[in-house]
Amino acid sequence: MIDSDPRVLLGHGTENDFVVLPDPDGTTWPEARLDAELVRRLCDRRAGLGGDGVLRVVRSAHVPDAPAVLGAALGECEWFMDHRNADGSHAEMCGNGIRLYLHVLLTEGLLDRAAAEAGVLVGTRGGPRRVGARADGSYWVDMGPAVPLGRGEARIGGAVFPGLGVSMGNPHLACLTDVEVDTLDLTVLPGVDPGMFPDGVNVELVNVLAAADAPGGASAHVRLRVYERGVGETRSCGTGACAAAWAALDAGGRTAGTVVVDVPGGRLTVGFDGTTTVLSGPAVVVATGVLTREWLAG
């Protein structure tokens, strides 16, 4: 039982939206309270608040599995992004979510602007990630290296789409295609090889656009739609944008460059320097309020 009406925020990064639960000291939403059923209720777009997932804003010291996933970096990660998918499952990493997470740390007064602009290390179940604020109001996150997982394929509506498996702390299958991505049916989970992806995978369908039209002198420009495991099709996926951008560069024989990624919810920029990956884009808090006891008791 929740003893008081707990605060809640709604926000998004390029329309990849989240229910955000401020819980700095881990007292309002311990694991026993924030179970899979409650996460599903929160993310329900009719009977709950609605979202692609839930982000609990909590210090790493209050997350039982933080030492195991952060290792030696635990002492540098004051904050931990406790991320759940809409189906209640834990998620390793979310590029849109972690930008929103930093934005909430700032708007809630839990982090000062100077520290945010310098960049801070935040714990995730995909490992520590450095994230920072820019003067223009956008945010960046060091996503770590893109790790190729081999070739695979997705099956959609009887058609087969060859793709490249890529890990960004979570698994992806990025499928470059000449078929207009807007014409594809992503209302159902694309078929994939369970042997290659035993824990499921995020599937990206990617159109590579004319390089000459790439904004701001970028190396490449792509359009993306994504089916996110545990969620369904989303308006944006930060790790998916990184995987799609990597696949586009790889197809051109490159390992470094900047890729502009257009998703249904907006625009992201992904930069590769041959060592790591930096994702940049906006983050917005839409509303704040409280969860009522009436709803929590339902």
Image (tube, helix red, strand yellow):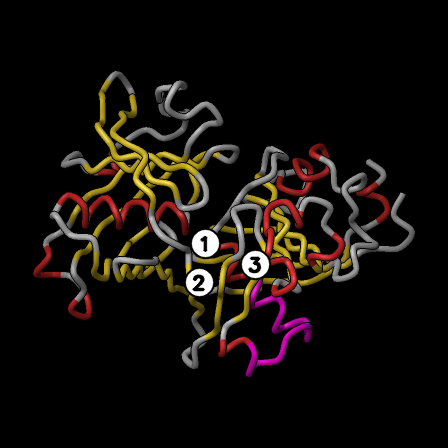
Q: Amino acid at mark 3?
A: Gly
Q: Are marks 2 and 1 in contact (CB under 8 Å)?
A: yes
Report helix, strand or loop for mark 3: strand
Rendered position, 196 above or below 298: above
Q: Where does residue 135 sit, x and y in percent of width and height?
A: 43, 81
- State the CA–CA distance, disc 2 to disc 1: 7 Å
Frontmost of labels 2 and 3 is 2
Reading the image, the residue beneath label 3 is 11
Reading the image, the residue beneath label 2 is 141
Residue at 57 percent across and 51 percent down: it is: 124
**Left or right for 33, reference 143:** right
Counting every numbered tag in the picture gives 3
Report helix, strand or loop for mark 2: strand
Rendered position, 278 above or below 125: below
Reading the image, the residue beneath label 1 is 95
**Magenta region, main secondary structure:** helix
Q: Amino acid at mark 2?
A: Val
Q: Magenta span covers which residues?
A: 101-115
